[in-house]
Amino acid sequence: MFETVAPCAEPVQTGELLTEIEATIRRHVILNEQAAAALAVWVLHTYTFELRDAVAYVAIESPEKRCGKTTLVSVLAAMAHTPLIAANITLSALFRGIDRCRPTLFIDEADTFLAGNGSMRGIINSGNTWRTAYVLRLSRSRANRGERKACHTGVLPHLAEEPETEFVPPHSTVPGGAGGESGLIRYSCWCPKVIALIGETPDTIADRSIVVKMSRKLVSESCAPLSDLDPAGIKAKCARFALDAREAIAHCGKIRGEGLNDRAADTFDPLYAIARLAGGDWEKKLHAAALALTATAQHENAGVELLLDILSILIESGQKKIFSRDLVATLRSGDDGLRSLALKDSEVDEYSIAKRLRPYGIKPVVIRIGKEVNRGYVDTDFREALHRYVPRGQIEARAEELRHRGRLQKEASELAKKEAAEREKARAEEREKEAEAQLPEALAMLARLRRGRGGKQAGPGTGPQDVTGM
């Protein structure tokens, strides 16, 4: 079923191999630097995933069609270990295919069948750690186990030594059949998975995934066609890497990236082990990608977004308290750019906000601001909840957003002052020009006034001749 991968003869430099994979991805798909680096490490991870406690998923999402999702799926599948691609998949095919073949599973067009399918989402969610990656199904006969022999025709030698799936003895006999024995069989659903869809990834899957956001390329951007992709050399190097690095990866201690929550730390742990083995700046690159992509994955957590929005309002206002009615007014207005996407327009009221915050242990209390007493919130309650529920990367992203908005406001204020000064200067220059234009007329008027006064002083009976005549 799968192509047999023959390892290359010479040992490979892990860092150089990752750089080659990264360059190949970016040659065929428009991606940012963080996503390309994380996906390069993930490709190697598909060859060694069974050596760690957790497996990393990839969630590829786009707002519209023709954004390159399927192209990225094709590029990753060309280089990944034992790829199994499905544009649609049933629940039973999902866990039976994984249990038999231990593939790297690619599910494209997941938006067409994943929404509302809680059972499939539950299986996908449980499949990222080997301790929980099992599905129980009732089997009528032990002979059914014969149908579940693994099809590891293309699996590397060190991965072919699979523990036999456990048959759980029955507590009772199920009627029917020829009196055959019945019992429970555990099917493994543990393997790397890529889930591509239009729209946003369900939050429980995004929480376990490297979330890659796709967008349509610009006219000025270009990619090499898939027909130019020849992954044979890369796959042979990956196979050799899996053979040579098996012990190092298996015995590498758990690596927890600073600033990641527990789930993200589990997801990226097997990738950190590979990046550390690669040396150079790969661990640093992967950590930057983990922080950026984890923050991306958390964007749709409505409660977390509301926590961040309210704390941002408190920080920007310079207050440690806020009345509930003022909070509602700020969220409704959106004048400061913080209108929360966590609540619909009809839900932006005191009751709905209190209801949304209640699971985080935050309740409105009676507070005093100045001389007024009313119900509201205190910033310390939000800070504690943020430390408990929000990844550091997301907090830093919001802090940078606030700093950026502060810089913009400062620049806008300085620009407004500068424009006001320029307007005042222009008005002064205009007044000066008007004064200069009116100066000749004013001087002429003054001269006439002086001549008029001189004429009056020289009137009859007042001149010197009159004095002489006397």
Image: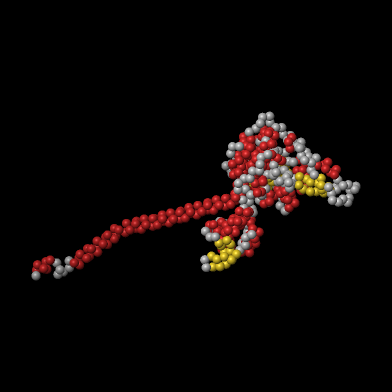
State the quadrant of the C terminus.
Answer: bottom left
Residue 270 in sight from this viewpoint:
yes
Q: Residue placed at 80% from the left, 44% from the top?
A: 166
| Left or right of 378 in this view: 148 | right
From the viewer's side, name the closer residue of 228 and 349: 349
Q: Is residue 432 left or right of residue 417?
A: left
In the rendered image, the quadrant that contains the N terminus is top right
Residue 227 seen in the figure? no
Which residue is farthest right? 178
Q: Residue at x 59, y 58 (%)?
A: 382
Vertical arrangement, residue 148 with respect to residue 204, above or below: above
The residue positioned 68% from the left and 29% from the top of the image is 9
Pick whichever, 200 or 56, lies toward us: 56
Up the image or down, 282 lies above or below 459; here it is above
How far across and how far down the image is residue 143, in percent?
A: 85, 43
The number of numbered badges drawn on the structure is: 0
Percent across and percent down for residue 202 are 68, 51
Q: In terms of depth relative to the viewer, which is nearer, 23 or 54?
A: 54
Q: Position of residue 84 (x, y in %)?
A: 73, 41
Residue at 62% across, 48% down: 260
218 left or right of 455 in image? right
